[in-house]
Image (tube, coloured by chain):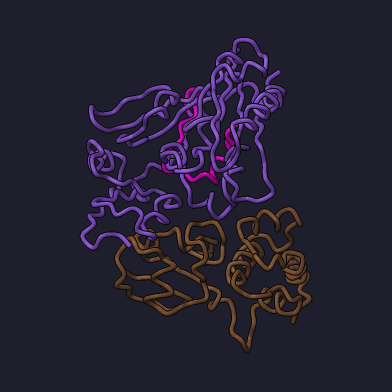
Amino acid sequence: MNLTVNGVERDLDSPPLTSLLTALREELGITGPKAGCQQGGCGTCTVLVDGEPRRSCLLPLAHVEGAAVTTVEGLGTPARLSPVQAAFHQEYGSQCGFCTPGFLVATHALLEHKPSPTRADIETALSGHVCRCTGYVKILAAVEAAIQGEAA
Amino acid sequence: MARPDVEILTPSSPASATQAFGDGAGITVLAGGTIVMPELTSARLRPERVLLLARSGLDRIERSGGAVTIGAGVRVAALEALDEPLATAARHVGDPEVRAQATLGGNLCAPPGAETPRGDLQAPLLALGARARSTGAGGERTEPLEDFVADSRRRLLLDISYEPPDAAGYAAVRRPHSHHYTILAVAAARTKGELRVAVTGAGPHAVRLRAVERSGNPDDALKDVDPQDDALASAWYRKRVLPKLVARALEGVR
């Protein structure tokens, strides 16, 4: 079962009904996507599948054979943050950090599709992502900063 | 985790999906995965055979002779661009990521949740007078969706069809979070002079409010349903809110 993860082709042994989330974390050791509710309700496991944001906990491996998967690790590096990561860092868009991988990936996808989204577009795109630190004001400020290209 | 010996069926056409489903005995159908995957991951469900529909070609939307036919594997996100009241109801399901994975068939066929109603798309499609084409024991059959949702066990839904309405309305109890379950929602549509009104959340599956259809009086809603207490809301609350929602939905079809 082949998959490209963050640009690297991987051969997986996990059974086909394993969730993509479990395979990423437990077989490949890629722990950016978090195992939050594991029923699609929290958004912290969101990854890009062929460029589209998807809940990795809801996807069986069988459905992503041959796909290109990007996790939060694939957006940037600590030395070279992506524009969205830099904006979240600058605007304190992360508190405990558990929800952050999902917010970063979903925001990245939103801005890829729509570089100048309205506030309503942002709220809809992120509506499935839960921050239990309730840091939504700073998260939205970070997204606005990323749109403006303010963070370096 | 799934059983190590689970048999996985991956049909590549509607015909092979029908054949693989057979009479449905012992088969778990997995389409978008939004309902089944959590059950598998948590091992609440340990099926012997799983039918994966993702590549079965049941994901087409067709318009011909004035009718719209929607394959069971069409994603909920794609329904947002179709007719009302279906489009609005589709936008009320989950969030954009979940809607991009979830399918029409899963939403219509999932058994009622242990503590909460499911099937938000049943009421709008009942209001549209939709018909369901399914397969299973005894072969293929097409019937009013109303009959199908009353007992869809061991049936594989193939598609749904309806005629676009002349007017439609929708009203739901909303909570400020995208992942709330629907407490109560009412859909209404007028097609070729016929008014249909249906409710989700007043029982294990959606039903038509025939007394309201005849009288146009929202207070008649409780003649067709007897809402129960569940984890989301009390029967007391639902009985008081239902006529208000009916009145709002009917505003769209006046």
As for residue B32 lying within the magenta part, the answer is: no
- The spot of residue B82 in percent (x, y) is 57, 36
* Residue at figure coordinates x 61%, y 20% from the top left: B221
Q: Is residue A65 left or right of residue A109?
A: left
Q: Would residue B83 be seen by someone viewing this image from the given angle?
A: no
Chain B: drawing colour: purple
Q: Quadrant of the C terminus of chain A?
A: bottom right
Q: Is residue B59 left or right of residue B122?
A: left
Q: Which chain is rendered brown in the image?
A: A
| Residues drawn in magenta | B64-87
Image side of residue B230 versus residue A127, left or right: left
Image coordinates for residue B213, horizontal then vertical, percent: 60, 14
The quarter of the picture where the N terminus of chain A appears is bottom left
Q: Is B68 within the magenta?
A: yes
Residue B156 on image: x %, y %: 33, 37
B22 relative position to B117: left or right: left
**Relative to A98, does residue B21 appear above or below in the rendering?**
above
